[in-house]
Image (tube, coloured by chain):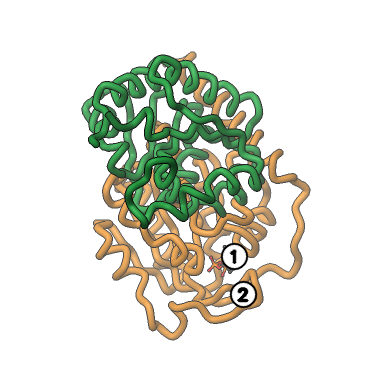
Chain colours: A green, B orange
């Protein structure tokens, strides 16, 4: 199983079509080809953080600056960013559009991903973060656009979970 | 040296800059000097003031950004110094008021108390080129003005006493602060666009 280059391109094109100009990210296997594209694209500002919680602060700064921004991370990074999500984004009504690689779920061969994968949905619910699963390359661009729109209208964090169906060939 | 004195000294310089402060004592001391629409008070999420500063500085290259941080907050997000060093926003001044204390939560010693942990060395080791160390208000004022003139990412570690304001309270809701801060930036960006 390998990361899908074709679908990574579709996702990246969807991000750009949604009008996103800036991305904060922490790399992981499924996000690799996507981040490579972001790095190579002169019209997109890519900020790579050392820990995902930093990206919550950066996203708030981008929001205050008026620059359309999304966050790319894996679900364990989301778990590592929770206080920032709660005590900055939700407390101050700062929208976040998060694209989260859902590791450790259906079909996961690696034991170390599984606990995070199992709890991710429950944690999103507990935090009242609206989420959708992205499985179909034919729909993902629309889902990204809608996630972005909803984050901005609700002034809330929103998560689009990038699944194995979408990310692996 | 007291943080309140340092803030008072630089307050006139903050008029046209985007300012992000940490919670509690530091936020209150700045607020007590007179709130401005270009001040954002991060009242809870420890460690992220500098990350907000990076987001602002990156996306608003024509603005100057000043982050007013604390030792406890920085220690909770040390990776931020490496990320700042990696992207080196020229328009960001990161002031760390090092009082060796978690002052706003009861004054317990932090890891920098008695010089155990050296934040200057950490910032330098993270790759920040311009790191100043201030122990007197004169040092601090000079370091701050030098940072403004330098127009390069600058970190100032200011050793201050573990003292805070004598009262707390702001006539400003958290969301209101965020909305107004954003509006101030938008209007200023528009006005700049109109004259450009
Ligand atoms: C995640 C988290 N843990 C603990 C606290 C409690 N807390 C509130 S203020 C504070 C200390 C902040 O220290 P510092 O950044 O050095 O600023 P100072 O209060 O000393 O000015 C702590 C630990 C918190 N707000 N968030």
- For image coordinates 43% across by 51% down, the residue present is A76
Left or right, A146 with respect to A134, comes to: right
Chain letter of the residue carrying label 2: B
In percent of width and height, residue B56 lies at 45, 38
Which element type, helix, strand or loop, lies under badge 1?
helix
Give the Cα separation between the discs numbered 1 and 2.
9 Å
Residue B163 marker: 2
Examine the rendering and report whether any part of residue B146 can be seen.
no
Q: Of discs 1 and 2, which sits in the foreground? A: 2
> Which quadrant: the C terminus of chain B?
top left
In percent of width and height, residue A109 lies at 33, 48
Q: Earlier in the sequence, mark 1 or mark 2?
A: 1
Q: Is residue A56 above or below residue B74?
A: above
On the same chain: label 1 and label 2? yes
Asked whether the beta carbons under mark 1 and mark 2 sit within 8 Å of each other, the answer is yes
What residue sits right under mark 1 in the picture?
B4
Left or right, B95 with respect to A5, comes to: right
Left or right, B166 with respect to B10, comes to: right
């Amino acid at each position: 199983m390998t990361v899908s280059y074709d679908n990574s391109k579709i996702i990246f094109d969807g991000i750009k079509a949604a009008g996103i100009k800036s991305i904060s990210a922490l790399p992981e296997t499924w996000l690799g080809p996507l981040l490579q594209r972001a790095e190579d694209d002169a019209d997109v500002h890519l900020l790579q953080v050392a820990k995902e919680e930093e990206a919550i602060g950066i996203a708030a700064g981008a929001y205050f600056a008026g620059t359309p921004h999304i966050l790319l991370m894996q679900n364990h990074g989301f778990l590592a960013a929770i206080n920032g999500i709660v005590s900055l984004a939700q407390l101050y009504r700062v929208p976040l559009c998060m694209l989260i690689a859902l590791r450790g779920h259906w079909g996961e061969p690696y034991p170390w991903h599984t606990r995070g994968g199992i709890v991710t949905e429950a944690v999103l619910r507990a935090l009242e973060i609206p989420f959708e699963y992205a499985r179909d390359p034919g729909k993902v661009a629309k889902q990204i656009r809608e996630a972005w729109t909803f984050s901005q209208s609700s002034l809330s964090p929103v998560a689009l979970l990038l699944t194995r169906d979408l990310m692996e060939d | 040296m007291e943080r309140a004195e340092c803030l008072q000294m630089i307050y006139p310089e903050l008029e046209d800059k985007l300012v992000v402060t940490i919670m509690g004592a530091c936020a209150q001391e700045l607020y007590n000097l007179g709130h401005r629409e270009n001040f954002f008070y991060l009242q809870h999420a420890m460690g992220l003031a500098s990350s907000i500063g990076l987001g602002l500085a990156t996306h608003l290259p024509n603005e100057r950004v000043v982050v007013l941080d604390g030792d406890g907050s920085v220690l909770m997000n040390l990776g931020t110094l490496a990320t700042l060093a990696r992207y080196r926003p020229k328009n960001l001044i990161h002031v760390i008021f090092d009082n060796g204390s978690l002052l706003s939560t009861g004054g317990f010693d932090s890891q920098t108390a008695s010089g155990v942990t050296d934040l200057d060395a950490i910032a330098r080791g993270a790759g920040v080129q311009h790191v100043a160390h201030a122990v007197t208000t004169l040092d601090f004022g000079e370091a701050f003005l030098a940072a403004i003139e330098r127009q390069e990412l600058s970190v100032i570690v200011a050793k201050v006493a573990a003292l805070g304001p004598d009262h707390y309270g702001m006539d400003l809701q958290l969301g209101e602060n965020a909305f107004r801060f954003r509006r101030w930036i938008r209007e200023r960006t528009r006005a700049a666009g109109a004259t450009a």
